[in-house]
Image (cartoon, rainbow, N blue to C red):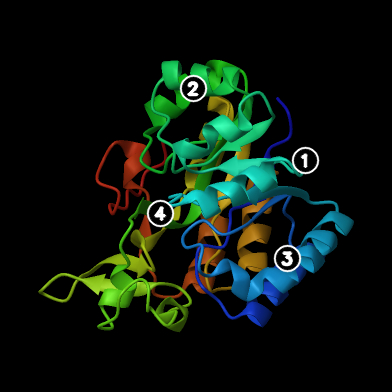
C-alpha cells in the first residue's frame, strides 16, 4: 500500500488578502501537508482581491515541496469565467475541475475531478478517468460502501476528512440577500464571516453555514476514527478543508493518525481543543443524514 497523502482543499471563505496570503505562507512553512489546492471555487468576484498574492503563495508552496493543484469555480457563469479556466488549463498546471462545463477544456490532459462533480458510480468514474482525470475527489455525501466500490478503479481517490461539508453552490447569493443586497452589489459582505454565516432553524438550532453563494454544513466533518478503514478500502488522499482555526495543528493530528504515531481517539481528544464548541458530523459516511454524529468506527 502506497503512503497516504494529506491534502489541503481550496480555501472556500472570503478572507482579507493579507490573511489569505499569510495563511498559505504558514501552510508552506509549517504544515505537514503533501498537496495544496489553491484557487477560487465559490465566487469569481473575490479572485481579483487577492490576485497579487497568488504567485508568491505558489512559489512558497513549491519551495516547501508541496504539490500544487489549481482549483476552479464550482459554477462557471459566463464566457469570461470559462476563458479563465481555459487559460489556466493551458498553463500546464494541474487543475481541479469543479464544474462539468469545464471538462471539455481539460479533456485528454491530466486533471483532478473536484467534489462538486457528482461521482457516485463506476460508469461516471470510468468516463472521467478515460478523459484524463488522474484523481477523483469524491462528494462528501458518498457513503462508505460507495467509497469502497469506486476505490477499486485503480486511480487516486481523495476524500474530505475534516471541515465544513460543501453541500451546494447557487447562482444567487444568499449572503448578500441576508444583508439586503444583491449579488451584483454585494459589497463583499461574505468577508464579514471568516468561517461562514450561521443559518438557524426557527427554533434557534444552527444547521447550515452560508458562504456567499455556497451552502455548507454547520458542523465540521471529522473522520479521524475511520482513516485506517478508508485507507484499507483504497482511499489515497485525505483532504482537510480550511477553517478559521489552527489548520497547522489540524494537519499535525491527521498526519499522526495516518502514520500510526497517534491513535484515533487520542487525536480526537486533541482536535476537540482546536474546534472548541463546533459540532462534529460524520453521518454521510455511515449512510445517515450528514449532520449526524456516529460514535462507532466503521
Name which of mark 3 and mark 4 comes first in the sequence.
3
The answer to whether residue 98 is seen in the rendering is yes
Residue drawn at x 58%, y 67% as measured from the top left: 47
Specify few, some or many for label 2: CA neighbours under 10 Å numbering under 14, 14-19, or 20 or more: many
Q: Residue at x 51, y 62 (%)?
A: 44
Q: CA distance from mark 1 to mark 2?
A: 23 Å
| Image depth: mark 1 or mark 4 in front | 1
* Residue for badge 2: 125
Q: Which residue is mark 3?
A: 54
Q: Secondary structure at mark 4?
A: strand
Tell me the tag on residue 137. Answer: none
Left or right of 198 on screen, residue 104: right
Q: Secondary structure at mark 1?
A: loop
Residue underneath mark 4: 165
Give the image quarter of residue 182: bottom left
Query: Residue extending furthest left?
Result: 202
* Dot 1 alpha-carbon crowd within 10 angstroms: few under 14, some 14 to 19, many 20 or more: few
The mark nearer the N terminus, 3 or 1, is 3
> From the viewer's perspective, is the residue at label 2 or at label 4 nearer?
2
Residue 197: % across, % down: 35, 75
C-alpha distance separating marks 2 and 4: 21 Å
Seen at 33% across and 57% down, the residue is: 171
Residue named by callout 1: 92
Can you tell which of label 2 and label 3 is closer to the viewer?
3
Query: Does residue 134 sit above or below 12 in this rendering?
Result: above
Which numbered disc flags the more N-terminal residue, 1 or 2? Answer: 1
Which residue shows up at 45% across the image and 73% down it? 195
Pointers 3 and 4 in contact (CB under 8 A)?
no
Badge 3 element: helix
Q: Is residue 207 above or below residue 257?
A: below
Q: Tag 2, which secondary structure?
A: helix
Amino acid at each position: 500500500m502506497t503512503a497516504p497523502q494529506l491534502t489541503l482543499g481550496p480555501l472556500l471563505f472570503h478572507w482579507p488578502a493579507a490573511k489569505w496570503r499569510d495563511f498559505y505562507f504558514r501552510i508552506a512553512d509549517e504544515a505537514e501537508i503533501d498537496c495544496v489546492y489553491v484557487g477560487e471555487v465559490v465566487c469569481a468576484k473575490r479572485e481579483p482581491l487577492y490576485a497579487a498574492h497568488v504567485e508568491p503563495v505558489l512559489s512558497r508552496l513549491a519551495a516547501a515541496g508541496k504539490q500544487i493543484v489549481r482549483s476552479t469555480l464550482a459554477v462557471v457563469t459566463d464566457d469570461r469565467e470559462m476563458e479563465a479556466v481555459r487559460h489556466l488549463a493551458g498553463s500546464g498546471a494541474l487543475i481541479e475541475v469543479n464544474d462539468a462545463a469545464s471538462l471539455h477544456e481539460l479533456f485528454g490532459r491530466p486533471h483532478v475531478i473536484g467534489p462538486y462533480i457528482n461521482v457516485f458510480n463506476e460508469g461516471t468514474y470510468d468516463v472521467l478517468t478515460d478523459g484524463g482525470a488522474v484523481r477523483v475527489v469524491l462528494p462528501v455525501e458518498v457513503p462508505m460502501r460507495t467509497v469502497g466500490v469506486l476505490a477499486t478503479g485503480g486511480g487516486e481517490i481523495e476524500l474530505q476528512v475534516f471541515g465544513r461539508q460543501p453541500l451546494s453552490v447557487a447562482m444567487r447569493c444568499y449572503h448578500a440577500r441576508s444583508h439586503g443586497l444583491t449579488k451584483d452589489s454585494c459589497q463583499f459582505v461574505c468577508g464579514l464571516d471568516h468561517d461562514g454565516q450561521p443559518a438557524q432553524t426557527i427554533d434557534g438550532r444552527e444547521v447550515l453555514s452560508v458562504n456567499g453563494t455556497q451552502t455548507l454544513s454547520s458542523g465540521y466533518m471529522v473522520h479521524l476514527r475511520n482513516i485506517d478503514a478508508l485507507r484499507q478500502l483504497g482511499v489515497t488522499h485525505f483532504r482537510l478543508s480550511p477553517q478559521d482555526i489552527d489548520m497547522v495543528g489540524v494537519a499535525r493530528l491527521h498526519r499522526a493518525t495516518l502514520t500510526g504515531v497517534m491513535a484515533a481517539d487520542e487525536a480526537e481528544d486533541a482536535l476537540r481543543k482546536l474546534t472548541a464548541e463546533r459540532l462534529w458530523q460524520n453521518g454521510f459516511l455511515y449512510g445517515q443524514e450528514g449532520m449526524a454524529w456516529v460514535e462507532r468506527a466503521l
